[in-house]
Amino acid sequence: MSDTSITALLTHLGTHAKSVEVINPNNGKAAFVLPQFSSAEVFAAVAAAKVMAPTWAATPVKQRANILLNLHDLMLKNQEQFLDLLQFETGKSRGHAFEDFAGALNSARYYGKQAPKQLGLKRVRSGAPTLTKNYLEHVPVGVVGVITPWNYPLALTGLDVLPALVAGNPVVHKIDNQTALTALFLRKLAIDAGLPSEVWTIVVGDGAEVGNAISDSVDYVAFTGSTATGRIVAQRAAARLIGYSLELGGKNPMVVLPGANISEAARIAVAGAVGNTGQLCVAVERIYVPNDVKAEFTAALEFAVGALSIGKSAEYAVDLGTLTSAAQVKRVTGMLADAAEKGAKVFGGEQRTELGPYFVTPAIVTNVPEDSTLNRSEVFGPVLQVYGYATVAEAIVAANDTEFGLNASVVGPEREALEVARQLNAGSVNINEGFRASFASMDSPMGGFKNSGHGRRNGVYGLTRFTEPKAIGVAGGLLGWALKLPSRGAEYKRVSKLLVILSKTLRILP
């Protein structure tokens, strides 16, 4: 990417006292200097957004929705630039960059079409149909703070920022330092699509300083990241009695049922584990297979992993790209080394420094020791752990034996798989697929049980979470000329008989 293009995108951030060098993960070299916000500058950005909030909230929802649909069209026209940016900042393969792009594209289209249907004033059923009329209105919550990580900078921005905007809220958005350019480019196109520039502000900086400043000043916060940081966000939001949604970590299981096609199950497992080189919260990490086919399944996994190509290409020529940072390499290889030292058998997981400093091949681990870090901690890398089981009931218990509950998978005949899926404690369960069957559906809510999160993104809830529902009741109706809501004892006596008749009638109606 040219220095001129980078400079143009960074203009929105302004000039600040501090800055950091951003590393290109493809070669490990400094790519450009990124300014850093202080907490005081974040507070100022939120204050400015609050000034804009009433004007944006008063903008007709249809007009806000049209901006998203215009953005959708502009994204398609600039698809290749987005893919180039994503590969430049994260080191993804071209295919995984496209998945990232598609997430934001789908969000722009979905919420651009759904917002007018969901956010307008709606007539709702009354408790006393002849005496009252009732309406529901969704009111913007205020300034929304969105905090997104580096692994899916485009998709996660689209899935949180865009619904917050179309719901009528200004957004102050903290993007990770590693992937600021992708978000800045999406914002530029949103402005070209008609979005007022003051409505979406992007800030960057130290995670704790900038993140805490957002949580301490906005009216709602949407966070994606680690469970440890999510707890801090929740505590700070709760102290201020503001709403929040959290999409956090996972240790996602896959249960391979007896009778499943072994080679197909291995293919599904690998595809579910190595998306974005495993740097994906919903990626498959733990696989449970019947004891009598464990060896066969492990061999099939090794074959499937060995067939993957890894490298750098601006075309759809390789399957996997690089890990995104030195910290990621240390995390993945460190967990593998710890497991091996404690008795695990590790296939793969080798550094390919001839390709670049952060390239690591996918790994398959068997005989995982109970006391290894790998056993229960999220890897966030291309690592598949294989465990055997004697009965399906045993596999379900093992799959659920975790502090997390984000995503799960079942491979096997659909009827049996559906029965198992309903017993797994996860916010999404995919049958004969790793994560894409549910994640690709914008109508399907996405989020976690237990320590994997709070609330949901996607679907109608992904939009209405950024609003306050307001109930409006109107006294009067078909019999308003003759009857009124009671206020005196004699009036209650007369009206109560009518309401009992109404209740009995409503009981038998659909």
Image: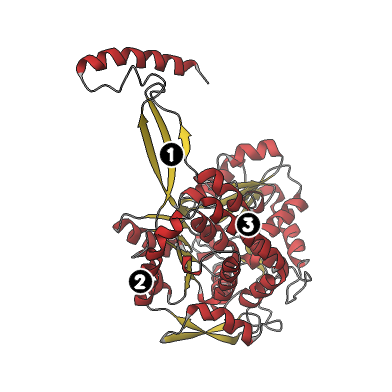
The amino acid on which the numbered mark 2 sits, given as a three-letter code, is Phe
Instruction: Name the residue located 50 percent from the left edge and 62 percent from the top edge.
Output: 377
Q: Which residue is mark 3?
A: 69
Q: Secondary structure at mark 3?
A: helix
In x, y percent, where is residue 459?
Answer: 56, 47
Mark 1 secondary-structure assignment: strand
Q: Residue at 30% of width from left, 23% of height from top?
A: 485
Where does residue 114 sit, x and y in percent of width and height? Answer: 58, 47
147 vs 487, left or right, is: right
Question: Mark 1 packing: few (<14 Cα in 10 Å), some, or many (20+)?
Answer: some
- Report the residue marked by disc 1: 136
Is 277 drawn above or below residue 472 in the view shown?
Answer: below
SS assignment at label 2: helix
Q: Residue lying farthest left?
A: 489
Dot placed on the residue nearer the N-terminal end, 1 or 2: 2
The residue identified by callout 2 is 43
The answer to whether residue 435 is visible is yes
- Amino acid tagged 1: Leu
- Tell me the kind of residue under disc 3: Leu
